[in-house]
Image (cartoon, grey):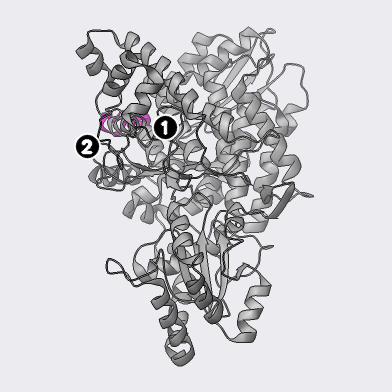
Amino acid sequence: TSPYLLQHAHNPVDWYPWGPEALARAKSENKPILLSVGYSACHWCHVMEHESFEDSEIAALMNELFVSIKVDREERPDVDAIYMEAVQAMTQHGGWPMTVFLTPDGEPFYGGTYFPPTDRGGMPGFPRVLAAVADAYQNRPDEIAKSAQELTGIINQHAMERVESSQLSDQIISAAFSGLEGQFDWAMGGTKGSPKFPQPMTIEFLLRVYKRTGEEKALNMATLTLDRMARGGMYDQIGGGFHRYSVDSDWLAPHFEKMLYDNSQLALAYLHAYQVTGRPFYRRIVEETLDYVLREMTDPAGGFYSTQDADSEGEEGKFYIWTRPELRSALGPELSRLVERYYAVTAEGNFEGHNILWLPRSPAKIAGELSISEEQLDDQIQQARKKLFAVREQRVKPGRDDKILAGWNGLMLKAFAEAATVLEGRNKADTGPYLRAAIANANFVLSVMRRDGPLLRVYKDGQAKMHGFLEDYACFADGLLALYEATFDPKWFVAARELIDQMGILFADQEGGGFFDTSIEHEKLVSRPKNVFDNATPAGNSVACDVQMKLSLFTGDFEYAQRSLEYLERAAQLALRYPSGFGRTLCAMYFALTAPVEIAIVGDPGSEETARLLDVVYGEYRPDQAVALKSPDDDQAGQVIPLLAHREAIEGRATAYVCQHHNCKLPVTTPEALREQLAEIAG
């Protein structure tokens, strides 16, 4: 069911999926394995397919000399992670397509990423690589065995085994911030140089540093990056949503694929920046991004699709780019002149003779030049965007990978749930589109992708399959907790806790702390991966830390928090050395150090009185809180969520209990009193 594998179904290469049949054939014929890993939205994966895998002569060479296996990295993150580590050890870089040569036992001995079909730019052509690797395998077996042994040893040594534990302290947070500051691009935001990848977890950490310390520089780093990304070509200025990354240092020219995991995390980063700053621009980016997901990436049954391709009609970015005549035809002379100035459109273009729409200059400056208000400018731009969107909808759309992955759905579930909490009504009798999407997603995954308890990884074409990985359990539990705090329906809390308890049984690393990426039910590979780095998606371990610490607040069970603290202390030195690779981990450390706030509310979920208390709770950026609510007549809620146990409404009014370090302040019934208590804690 993998769209990526199906894209290769008609190649002349005799591809196998990863599995016992391919491995058995390699052993019986004593042939090396050629492992090719990629994903459906990957532009260079398509290039290598067209250049090499569709070429009959190269395919014949592959079929003669190797057993060739094609893997969708999104379905099999374990296979991808193991062999990516080997490629990075060999070449000092990685990426997709990934090409790795293995012994029949699955041990890597040589590899790289993209190979051209002929010698080019100092890179050997793929046929030459194939012939050399096959010759070495057959005629120099001792060298191959030695290389395989060394690489297998590297991938079996987990990163945290090489560092000492450190007690968590504010100094770690401060030092990590200093490290990020040293890498920061003060002109364009993000890290210095190119390409520029969005780093939403780093932005979340910067917002937390500002919240905790009042450090203006941290806020400026976050907002400069958010502004530049949203004004750049990396953001889809017409349809909303973010592309994968920018190939330049100005956020102008993206790789045009759109990934669910990027858009979920970036929507949250902009939502939190909106809470911190109150800037309507950030709210607009959140809404446009989530509306894009609802329009393009949501299955009618409630699941969220994985990716949209970079290419359409065989050309990268064709769906998104414009010529000046196309704009003038769509908008007419007057409006097109305004749009050309606003989006820096030129006759020559800024991308292969076409224009990627972006805002290198601020709207305020443009409005001043035109002697109109920013509001007037925005009104006209919004009119133009609607017209351009309608024209663009007539184009051939990029391909879409419509498989549904549990972990990525958990990331987007959290984004919709938190957006509903902040942007939609606090009256829990109301359900806006974001909350409806979150509820539909949770119902879909829990009913279709859990089979007799365990969580499954993938759903497509009516089939749910593959054991869930750590990131699936942790990220979906995280999303469920956010949905509980948006609805206060205890069934979402119960489901989250069940997943975390299962996670503890299936994935725990009893000796090294934290969790393995694969469960005790997964296939045994040459290594049992344990990723600790937060990359494009957060490491399962860092999300697990966050969720467990929050569960500890709801339940009073300190064992959840203790597991997280032990892991974070082991990760501290790595986070100090490589802060940009530990964004979510640093956020978890922040949570551990802040003495989070526990807020229990007793009140009718549909009443205005309760809604006014929730306005106070959710009206400010407060990433270090756990919020529970029950109706006054609900006698069972305290058994499910101990934070609600023995809480009563005072004089029949909606009542809030604020606690910290398991010590509670006097209950309050007015928004003013609640605001004062929360301010005292923050101070």
Residue 206: image x %, image y %?
A: 35, 36
Q: Nearer the viewer, residue 288 or 430?
A: 288
Q: Which residue is mark 2?
A: 186
- Return the x and y of residue 558 as percentages of the image width and height: 59, 44
Mark 2 lies on a secondary structure that is loop
Say if 316 sits above or below 16 in the image.
Answer: above
Measured as percent of width and height from the top left, residue 500 is found at 64, 46
Q: Is residue 424 magenta?
A: no
Give the vertical position of 680 relative to 145 (above or below): above
Inspect the image, locate mark 2, and give the three-letter code of the amino acid beneath it: Trp
Amino acid type at image mark 1: Asp
Task: Identify the disc placed on residue 456.
Answer: none
| Image height of 419 relative to 181, above or below | above
Depth check: 587 or 150 in front? 150
Q: Residue at x 56, y 33 (%)?
A: 296
What number is the disc on residue 236? 1
Question: Picture coordinates of residue 306 (x, y %)?
Answer: 57, 44
Q: CA distance from mark 1 to mark 2?
A: 23 Å
Q: Is residue 141 above or below residue 37?
A: below
| Quadrant of image for the N terminus | bottom right
Q: Nearer the viewer, residue 162 or 137?
A: 137
Asked if residue 71 lies left or right of residue 158, the reply is right
Is residue 358 among what the camera can see?
no
The part of the chain drawn in magenta is: 210-219
Choose between 612 and 343: the one closer to the eye. Answer: 343
Find residue 553 and report its image quarter. Answer: top right
